[in-house]
Image (tube, rainbow, N blue to C red):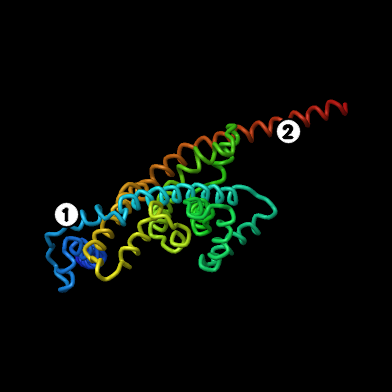
Amino acid sequence: MKSKSGNSLRSVLAHIVLIVLSFMCLFFFYILIINATRSHAELQKGFSALPGTHLLENLKNVANDGSFPMFRGIINSICISTACAGLCTYFSALTAYGLYAYEFKTRKIAFTFIMAILVMPTQVTAMGFLRLITKMGLYDTWYPLIIPSIASPAVFYFMYSYLQSSLPLSLVEAARIDGSGEFRTFNCIVLPIMKPALAVQAIFTFVGSWNNYFVPALILQTKSKMTVPILIATLRGADYMNFDMGKVYMMITVAIVPIIVVYLLLSKYIIAGVTLGGVKEQTRSGQRIIWKKILYGSFCHFEGKCREYGKKRMEI
């Protein structure tokens, strides 16, 4: 009875803590949505927990503002963030797999070099990076925002740690015995096992690229190429006579919708991906590995015996 009462008490406390944490996380989103439904004059009066009646008016003001291409900025951010997330997760996983699965002399040096880049802040290399892309003719384009995302030391380290805990090298050896090429092994066997890690890092990379303001503000100058953070900063920095807080809150509300959609699409892989992509695949492949090792060992043993018998016959 005591154990049951203790478990029920812990369950009640856990639910209370989770409810409080959920309220603290969602309260700010509630304020954002409420403020997006109020006009600039109502926002100047102070906070209100009740929604206003200016939701469609604020949305129309943002959408019809000729000097503020909101929907174009959202499309730009989606394109850049999607490309960054795809390239970053794939090539970081490929690099981590190369350092994990292959033995070579400079392996530790390469790992240390990649980790050393991790501690270098973006602001330190910003001016040199800006001069480089200007000389290459890439200024005011999307390429400097997408291509450098291929090299991400933080994502690489996460992928490397995940491979150490979830990918047995015997699985790779079995694929090689079957005649699978290295890229096919990575794309067809390793990537499905890494699906949870890929989903997590895709979400983080997408959100990081979506919220990135510093680098796009240095590179992009044409309004039709600007991303959402730059447009929000432009709207926020407007002169006092044209400043409208309702439009600002509406723009922020619209800007977080794609992030929520991406999370909802990829969150199922975080929860179920370990079981679906790893356990079943490893169970089936594990049985094949055992039999292949037995057959391969038996063949080697038989071949060795035949060679010994041949040598003895030659000596006779």
Nearer the observer, 192 or 253? 253
Nearer the observer, 35 or 140? 140
- Image coordinates for residue 214, horizontal then vertical, percent: 44, 64
Nearer the observer, 218 or 306? 218
Residue at 16%, 69% (x, y): give it.
Answer: 41
Question: Does the image show residue 189?
Answer: yes
In the rendered structure, which amino acid carries the disc numbered 2? Gly
Residue at 57%, 34% (x, y): give it.
Answer: 180
Which residue is labeled 2 in the image? 304
**316 versus 218 height, above or below:** above
Nearer the observer, 307 or 261? 261
> Dot 2 lies on which element?
helix
Comparing marks 1 and 2, which lies closer to the viewer? 1
Which residue is labeled 1 in the image? 56
Q: Quadrant of the C terminus?
A: top right
**315 versus 274 height, above or below:** above
Q: Are marks 1 and 2 in contact (CB under 8 Å)?
A: no
> Dot 1 lies on which element?
helix
In the rendered structure, which amino acid carries the disc numbered 1? Leu
